[in-house]
Amino acid sequence: MSFSLTTWNINSVRLRMPLVQDFLKAKGPDVLCLQETKCENDSFPMAAFRKAGYEHAAIHGQKGYHGVAILSKLPLSMIDRRDYCNMGDSRHVSAIVEPEKGRRIRVHNFYVPAGGDEPDPEINPKFAHKLKFLDEMRLLHAEAERHAGVSTILVGDLNIAPLETDVWSHKQLLKVVSHTPIETETLLDIQSSGAWVDLMREFIPPSEKIYTWWSYRAKDWKAANRGRRLDHIWSSADLAPALASIEVLGAARGWERPSDHVPVTAAFQLRTAQ
């Protein structure tokens, strides 16, 4: 059976709801994971999602900042919201989705701190926060619930472009937050130690460039094309063989009043659960 999931840093869900509605009408993933929703739970535009066919939601909101949400056509269960670093920020939510009877998948949705401008934790508290957040992510393992028959997908704006081909210029960005060695090495270690599979790089070879974010500061983002791959889709190893496609919808960056991130969708062809 087919199953699809999209991750998208929407940079204010209420402001960009028309774009979200158009995307859902055109693409219709089974699950949509949003980051930087920037609204409290009771202000989340749930009615519009229900109208679009997304009756189920796991929301972790915050007024004006951060915020993550999982919207689904399928029922969600065992919803969990973790306060990483005990900062009171809304940067994580997870839930179990069941694409078919007997096939259960835990979806983790993250918004990792950006880290500010200076990549030095001694003088930049935002960067120190980012590194601490990543350290706590090490505790999350892809096989954590396999004893209960649960596979795992981890998505979100992780605010790190780990590979040289995940940025427009490896050399020029080595001292720029999101591509510094301490960040890239830490993220790759989290992947390895947690037994995660980077699905985007399973489908698109590491030799090829991938960008999911283009700065608002560029006068002509498309011509400059100075992008970074900050948005990610990982999974437990059992789901990797079922991956059918990855779509990075770069055209979304050119929509009217867009987010600086674009939607990334993973589609699977799942074997019938035994």
Image (cartoon, grey):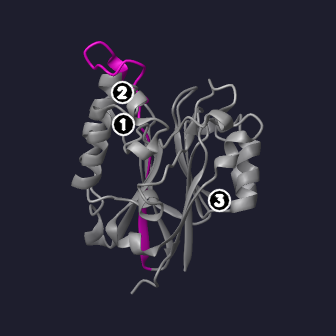
Measured Cα–Cα span from mark 2 to mark 3: 30 Å
- State yes or no: residue 28 in magenta: no
Name which residue lies at 60% across and 64% down.
30
What amino acid type should be assigned to the residue bearing mark 1?
Asp
Name the secondary structure under disc 1: loop
Can residue 45 be seen here? no
Q: Taking 118 as reference, is 169 left or right? A: right
Q: Give the image quarter of residue 104.
A: bottom left
Q: Locate the N terminus and report the quarter of the image it occupies.
A: bottom right
What amino acid type should be assigned to the residue bearing mark 2?
Met
Residue 20 position within the rendered picture, expressed as x and y whole percent measured from the top left: 70, 48
- What residue span does the magenta drawing correspond to? 102-126
How packed mark 2 is, by other alpha carbons closer than 10 Å (few <14, some 14-19, many 20 or more), is few
Q: Which mark is residue 55?
A: 3
What amino acid type should be assigned to the residue bearing mark 3?
Glu
Q: Taking 3 as reference, is 253 left or right? A: right
Name which residue lies at 27% across and 41% down.
185
Nearer the camera: disc 2 or disc 3: 2
Q: Which mark is residue 83?
A: 1
What residue is shown with label 2?
87
Measured Cα–Cα span from mark 3 to mark 1: 25 Å
